[in-house]
Image (spheres, rainbow, N blue to C red):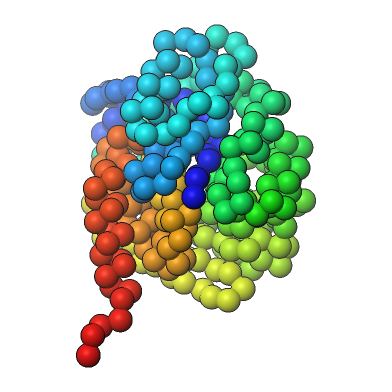
Amino acid sequence: MTVVVLGPAVLDRFYRLPRLPRTGESVLVETTWLDAGGKGLNQAVAAARAGAPARLACALAGDRAGRFLRRVAVREGVATDELLPARGGRSDETVIWVDRAGRHVLASRLAPGAWLPPELPRRVERMLAAGDRLLVAGPVPPALLVPLAARLAGRGVHVHLNLAPFPYDYGDLWPHLALVVANEGEMRLHLGRPPGAAARALLARGVRAVVTTRGAGGAVWIDPERRLRVPAPPVPVVDTTAAGDVLAGVLAARLAAGAPPERALRVAVRAASATVGRLGARRAVPRATEIARWCREEEAAGRPRRP
């Protein structure tokens, strides 16, 4: 089954620092680099490396950065046939500062009107069939997202929302969602409750399943039938920038392949944990061979042993 990721692709500018600066302080940069990134592209790459036929839905500018982003997506095996030309001639970008402890801060120049033109939702509908999955990985205003999700859910498409800290009221959206993925801070921000209570509130409002990510604590899956806690393997923390993107993309891919929730979440947590042990965002996503090995190991662990 196909995974379509609706979200932006941006140029990432990384700066590695010995520590994050305090207000008014200057800190010398140790190293810097450019990469293709953005929540949409990162999650599409993760889904593709996890074995899904992955497609990216967004608009790209025609500048040098936009052409670079398109080339990277194609090289990663992400279908780009539905990418639209962005209004305006300049690609969006994100500046990311990472310290030696793996902590990061970022600032993004992201214009929803540029990467998300009004005609894109209708094109997204044509990309999906019953059983496919739409992973919403960017700031999509409810006026566009709610009717899109309602139409797709009505046709049997599984709609995932990777919740992000944008000040939207998603109240009418919840009944159309198969899955919400969010970290603990995002759950508190949007629901105003502790993560466990927030997840139960989402289920009460019609969401079919909720995954709360807990950093080094792994992740928790909750639906009306089960509560699954998957611990994260201990890893040295190098950079946490893309961990959430990797978990959301790999989880969508494994569910699309028919893996049961616990097995899919275990692979996704392993992939996210491996990511934080590497520097960068897209370049830190585990390789396809690594994810395939973890899938085989989880499948073997789930088989009944012969007497």
Closer to the camera in the image, 271 or 306 = 306
Give the side of residue 104 with respect to residue 297, left or right. Answer: right
Instruction: Measuring from the top left, give residue 100's x and y in whole percent.
Output: 26, 39
At x 29%, y 31%, the residue is: 17
Closer to the camera in the image, 273 or 286 = 286
Instruction: Measuring from the top left, give residue 72's x and y in whole percent.
Output: 36, 25
In which quadrant of the rendered image does the C terminus lie?
A: bottom left
Instruction: Measuring from the top left, give residue 294's x and y in whole percent.
Output: 27, 58
At x 42%, y 10%, the residue is: 64
How many circles with numbers are drawn on the protein? 0
Specify whether residue 218 is in view. no
Give the side of residue 11 with respect to residue 136, left or right. Answer: left
Give the side of residue 232 with respect to residue 65, left or right. Answer: left
Is the residue 18 above or below the residue 128 in the image?
A: above
At x 77%, y 51%, the residue is: 172
Is the residue 223 above or below the residue 287 in the image?
A: below
Specify whether residue 5 is in view. yes
Residue 266: which quarter of the image? Answer: bottom left
At x 27%, y 37%, the residue is: 279
Give the side of residue 211 with respect to residue 140, left or right. Answer: left
Residue reaching furthest to the bottom = 307
Closer to the camera in the image, 193 or 261 = 261
Residue 137: which quarter of the image? Answer: top right
